[in-house]
């Protein structure tokens, strides 16, 4: 059975959501970052990790690529234009959304107090706001990022936008972006993953 290593409150939620979409058997090992057990899977102590057939995969992006390619679901074939467009949304989530979010989070609580830079916080919110404008243009009137087809790109984007909302970044409550978030989070697989996240706190 596939094992997902990491607390569902972390980036492991991306893989958890995809596993629920795929509806395949798996087990959650709810370990926090840098737990001594985590180092058995990842020398950096970071989560998530995935164990499949005795092999370990680290990093949520690599895990989601692996699962979607293996089961040929929620992705497009490698070497196609649609795959490139799909992957560009994942890159946008990790670079344009996650970079200011993670920089903000580190300087709020993660870094030692003497290394935190409060002056960077407004810059993080500004950069995110600019990225949100670009994202709204790219989303357009699509049901999902790639039109009517839900893909792993939606998982990465919606996870980032949810993270932003929890961190009190400005996310619209109405309009195309709000509708898109609600549509994706209304999926049954998301709801199942969310329920498991709540149980594994």
Image: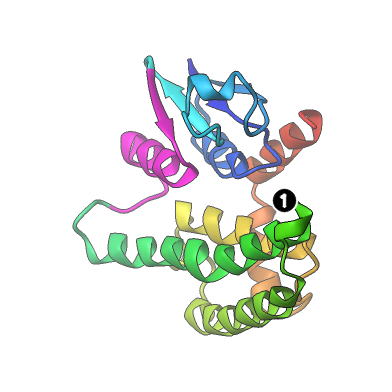
Q: Is residue 188 magenta?
A: no
Color theme of the render? rainbow
**Mark 1: which secondary structure?**
helix
The number of numbered discs placed on residues in the rendered structure image is 1
Q: Is residue 89 above or below residue 151?
A: below
Q: Residue at x 76, y 71 (%)?
A: 118
The residue that mark 1 highlights is: 110
Residue 39 percent across, percent down from the top left:
53, 24
Q: Toward the viewer: 81 or 187?
A: 81
Quadrant of residue 9 within the rendered picture? top right
Q: Toward the viewer: 100 or 171?
A: 100
Q: Residue furthest left?
A: 79
Q: Is residue 161 above or below residue 137?
A: above
Quadrant of residue 28 within the rendered picture? top right
Residue 106 percent across, percent down from the top left:
68, 57
Residue 159 percent across, percent down from the top left:
62, 55
- Magenta span: 55-76
Taking the image as shown, residue 130 lies to the left or right of residue 171, namely left
Q: Is residue 12 above or below residue 177?
A: above
Q: Toward the viewer: 2 or 186?
A: 2
> Can you say which quadrant of the picture contains the C terminus?
top right
Q: Residues within 10 Å of mark 1 (few under 14, many from 20)?
A: few
Q: Residue at x 48, y 56 (%)?
A: 150
Q: Residue at x 50, y 31 (%)?
A: 49
Residue 115 percent across, percent down from the top left:
70, 59
Q: Residue furthest front?
A: 114
Taking the image as shown, residue 185 lies to the left or right of residue 59, namely right
**Residue 117 visible from this viewpoint:** yes
Taking the image as shown, residue 198 lies to the left or right of residue 93, namely right
Q: Residue at x 25, y 51 (%)?
A: 77
């Amino acid at each position: 059975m596939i094992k997902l290593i990491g607390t569902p409150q972390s980036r492991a939620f991306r893989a958890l959501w995809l596993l629920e979409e795929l509806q395949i058997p798996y087990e959650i090992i709810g370990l926090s970052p840098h737990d001594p057990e985590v180092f058995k899977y990842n020398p950096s102590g970071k989560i998530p990790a995935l164990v499949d057939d005795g092999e370990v995969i680290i990093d949520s992006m690599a895990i989601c690529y692996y699962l979607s390619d293996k089961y040929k679901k929620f992705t497009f074939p490698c070497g196609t234009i649609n795959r490139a467009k799909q992957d560009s949304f994942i890159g946008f989530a990790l670079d344009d959304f996650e970079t200011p979010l993670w920089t903000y989070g580190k300087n709020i609580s993660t870094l030692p107090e003497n290394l935190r830079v409060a002056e960077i916080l407004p810059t993080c919110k500004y950069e995110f706001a600019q990225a949100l404008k670009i994202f709204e243009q790219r989303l357009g009137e699509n049901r999902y990022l790639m039109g009517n087809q839900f893909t792993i790109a939606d998982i990465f984007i919606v996870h980032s936008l949810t993270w932003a909302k929890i961190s009190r970044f400005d996310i619209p409550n109405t309009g195309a972006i709000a509708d898109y978030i609600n549509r994706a989070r209304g999926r049954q697989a998301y709801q199942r993953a969310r329920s498991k996240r709540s149980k594994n706190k």
